[in-house]
Image: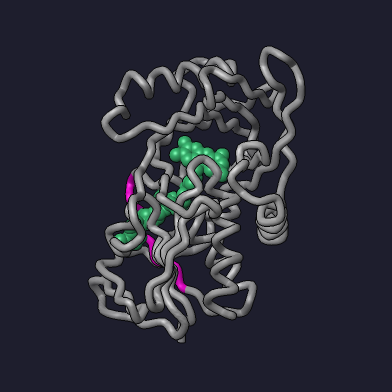
Amino acid sequence: LTDVIVVGGGIFGQVAAATLRREGAIVEVLDARRPGAGSPPAGCVLRPSWLAGMPASDLDAAMMLLDELYGLRELELESIPLRSVVRCHRVEPELILGKPVIHGAVLSVGEDGSVHTESGVETPRVGTVVATGQWAQELTPWVGDVTGRWGWSHRGPPVQRNTVRVWAPYRQTVAFNMSDGRSWSGDAQALLEKSKVPDKEAKSRARCAEAVGCDVSRLETMCGARPYAAQRDTEPALLRRRGRVWSITGGAKNGTAAAAWAARRLVREMLG
Ligand SMILES: Cc1cc2nc3c(=O)[nH]c(=O)nc-3n(C[C@H](O)[C@H](O)[C@H](O)COP(=O)(O)OP(=O)(O)OC[C@H]3O[C@@H](n4cnc5c(N)ncnc54)[C@H](O)[C@@H]3O)c2cc1C
């Protein structure tokens, strides 16, 4: 019998599933593979100064959990034009997102944790975690506002050096090599849907091609929405419960650390 069903196989859902499984729970992850999800384009870069909203003890615990589950890698970025070194960490996204999921859309979730799909209803023993990102309100309308803010990232040829360059307030172009030998680059845009226009995408591609040092045509672009959730001031992500249903998402640009924070809370609340 399944202990926990996780709806959504993005960063939040998969980190939660891995953490619950580590505690011995039998967990099933369902995912509809919806276009525009936030996790596929994510670089999974973590930089403590970008996580100012998270208390230091929570941040330390989240980083430790990610290290235990996936192995945190150090990432040094050369800051352009200052040439100082910016130290961050990262998780290889494939290690989080490459875990198996059952493909399928969930139509509704009951407060007893029952999960309704086209093939029937399943009720897990402990409860259900809804981790559906920008679509959180569809299955858990009681979570409050969740807004998708769109951005692009790009895979391309390797960079000679990993770099970060500020191009506008709170906007940096980051380019670094991933473990598969190709580069990841992104420019931290977080646009409302109406502003997600081809001109902005073209500018993102041009900025990132310059950072990578290649022609724009060599970049393979991915697009997704970061879920911005109305959460309590003291909390780095959204985590709400109703009956046997927990809904988690958010984290804005820091979804990876925020997902680990939520996963630790879920273990306490669901498994006691
Ligand atoms: C360009 C870009 C770069 C980023 N870079 C970083 C970074 O470097 N570091 C970092 O920490 N964060 C980064 N982020 C932010 C981070 O990716 C997000 O905070 C995170 O992806 C949110 O994950 P999530 O699991 O809540 O949502 P999502 O990834 O959107 O996952 C939701 C999942 O739910 C599924 N789903 C939805 N509805 C249903 C349904 N009814 N039934 C079944 N399944 C359903 C979808 O198919 C989807 O897979 C980046 C985001 C973007 C867009």
Residue occupying the point 30% across, 66% down: 106
The span shown in magenta is 28-35
Whether residue 262 is in magenta: the answer is: no
Find residue 177 and report its horizontal and vertical position in percent. 65, 32
Residue occupying the point 64% across, 47% down: 91
Residue 163 vs residue 203: left or right?
A: right
- Residue nearest the viewer, comparing 230 with 78: 230
Residue 89 visible, this orientation:
yes
When asked about the image quadrant of residue 261, the answer is: bottom right
Residue 58 vs residue 93: left or right?
A: right
Give the position of the C terminus as an image quadrant. bottom right
Whether residue 30 is in magenta: the answer is: yes
Residue 32 visible, this orientation:
no
Find residue 40 and report its horizontal and vertical position in percent. 46, 45
- Residue nearest the viewer, comparing 180 with 79: 79
When asked about the image quadrant of residue 110, the answer is: bottom left
Residue occupying the point 55% across, 61% down: 262
When asked about the image quadrant of residue 222, the answer is: top left
